Amino acid sequence: MPVCDVCGKEMRMEDGVILTTAQVTESPRYWGFGFSRKWPSFHEQHPDGAGIATIVAQQADQKTGWLVCETCARMFTYDRQEAKDRVREVLANPDKEYGRATDAKKVMLAALKAWQTLYPDTGAGKDEGSKAKAAGKPKSRSLLIALVVVAALAAAAYFLFGIRP
Ligand SMILES: [Zn+2]
């Protein structure tokens, strides 16, 4: 039985929609669900976010469409008619592909946005942030560090995508 590619629930293809890799991976809500529910030990294994570029590359690299149940579909912005048409296409041809996500920066920023919402005190700015909090100072320095980390991770994602044919 097919499963929802987001939550893993068993479902009939006819009952869901098929979204493209870009539609799924460019959504911060997908990453929020991912980091908190889909990969529950990810944060424990990568408390500083070091594994984000790798998981972004993996997820964005999928060429086939994503079967999504009606509940999970609410996380995304998409054209419903197109998404239902894809279900018919894939039922007729299971090998049908809709392409990997090509805007690495957009995917990376969606993932980082979700990460920072879930774990505002993690990442390179953590120690600076707690010190600033303790001293009652604004966290401008940790914000700057966080932006540098964002830029570095986005560059890493570009590199990971860039080495692919
Ligand atoms: Zn689902």
Image (cartoon, grey):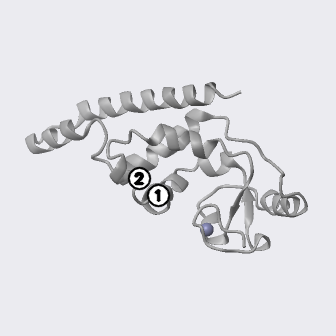
Closest to the observer: 13 or 110?
A: 13
Q: Residue furthest left?
A: 135
Q: Quadrant of the C terminus?
A: top right
Which amino acid is tagged 2? Phe
Measured along the vertical axis of the image, is residue 6 above or below residue 113? below
- Asked which secondary structure carries label 1, the reply is loop
**Is 43 on the left or on the right of 136, as rendered?**
right
Q: Is residue 60 left or right of residue 138?
A: right
Q: Name the spot of residue 18 as percent of width and height, x first.
A: 74, 59
| Marker disc for residue 39 | 1
Q: Where, by quadrant of the figure, is residue 78 drawn?
A: bottom right
- Determine the image quadrant of residue 127: top left
Can I make out residue 138 in this image? no
Pick the quarter of the image with the N terminus. Answer: bottom right
Quadrant of ligand 1: it is bottom right
Are discs 1 and 2 less than 8 Å apart at CB? yes
Q: Residue at x 10, y 44 (%)?
A: 134
5 vs 118, left or right, is: right
Crowdedness near tag 2: few (<14), some (14–19) or many (≥20) residues, C-alpha within 10 Å:
some
Amino acid identity at mark 1: Trp
Which residue bears the numbered disc 2?
42
Tally the marks: 2
